Image (cartoon, rainbow, N blue to C red):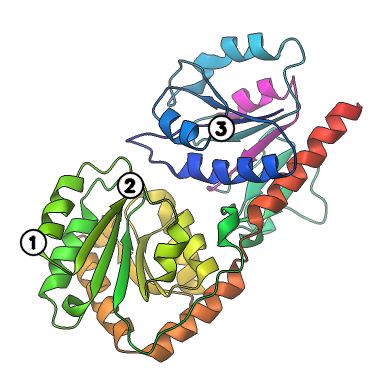
Amino acid sequence: MIWIRADGGKEIGTGHIMRCLSIADALRQLGEQVCFLLADTAVVPILEKRMQQYRVLDSSWRNPETEFARLREMFKGGGGDVFLADSYFVTAEYLGRVREYMPVCYVDDMGIRDLPVDLLINYNIFADRAIYGLGETEGSTAYLLGTEYAPLRREFQGIPYEVRKQARKVLLTTGGSDRYNLAGRILELALKDPVAGQMEYCVVSGAYNEYLPGLRLLESANENIHVYSNVECMWELMQSCDIAVTAGGSTMYELSAVGVPMICFSFVDNQERIVEGFRRRELVCYGGDYLAQGEQMLAEVVENIARLRQSRELRAHYSVRQRQLVDGKGALRIAGKLRDMAAGQRKA
């Protein structure tokens, strides 16, 4: 059994759950059993839709330490093979205690050093050995670092994409939640722009976006705005678009695998390093940091939409470079490593 400890909800979005579901799907493809461990029931509908086994621990996602008595009961009889944690709130003490029962793996976005884990996964564009202070040897922890491990769903492998002569459609997404209503505000500003206002907008609203009713009103008032929620085939929607506007996060790796030229921005702290990594490698148009720039960021996003619309050459440049970054097979690479660890446990 591979246990996956992750959470999602209105406050923390669905990023942790969605990337772990990609890893879980790859594990099941390899013949492994997977069970999610959740603090509460917030993401149960998502897991049930994917027919994914789970257990609810009735704890607090902000304080996972409160669930350890429950975990101890689950694991005292041998428990399982491998434990994968994907949470910003699990502590070194928590991971160390679980490690007494089985090997522990951790999905890291922050470059946290010296965690008591057997495997650390950081698939982000900024991830390298230097941020973990690694020399020629790695000690007791193994590392999977870099975008080749981006855990995308299987359908993101080998998607054909055409950089069309005329750009007509923009994909706009802000992740699982949009606390500042950035999607709505970008749309309102874009509609006033003589160039960006001519585009068709495909707006993906996350499961916890409280501003969805406002987006629906914009959709009803403007024939060039289409709002989507609970998208089944995201890759198809991406493939149909000529430009993407996205917040930093896993969506950037999906868009890279497809090859959609991107304008990216950040509005929470943990997005900044991802967005900056893409910017430094000249893979995207930079939209800005909302926390630092506020309204100016919205204006820069709209200016970049107009800029990309008017230059097929620039769109083609970004598309080629992005596709070279991500091949869509990262989840399978991670799953293969977890399978090997579990097999080693079973032989022990």
Mark 2 residue type: Gly
Instruction: Bin the neighbour count of mark 2 within 10 Å (Cα to Cα): few under 14, some 14-19, many 20 and up.
Output: many
Vertical side of 227 occupied by 102: above or below: above
The local secondary structure at tag 2 comes to loop
The circle drawn on residue 273 is: none
Q: Quadrant of the C terminus?
A: top right
At x 43% / y 50%, what residue is drawn? Answer: 270
The residue tagged 3 is 52
Q: Which quadrant would residue 276 be assigned to in this image?
A: bottom left
Instruction: Bin the neighbour count of mark 3 within 10 Å (Cα to Cα): few under 14, some 14-19, many 20 and up.
Output: some
Residue 244 image position (x, y, % from top left):
36, 69
Residue 282 image position (x, y, % from top left):
48, 77
- Cα separation, mark 1 vs mark 2, equals 21 Å
Taking the magenta stretch, the answer to whether it contains residue 167 is no
Mark 3 residue type: Gln
The local secondary structure at tag 3 comes to loop
Residues drawn in magenta:
91-110
Q: Which quadrant would residue 293 be assigned to in this image?
A: bottom left
Left/right placement of residue 335 relative to residue 47 reads: right
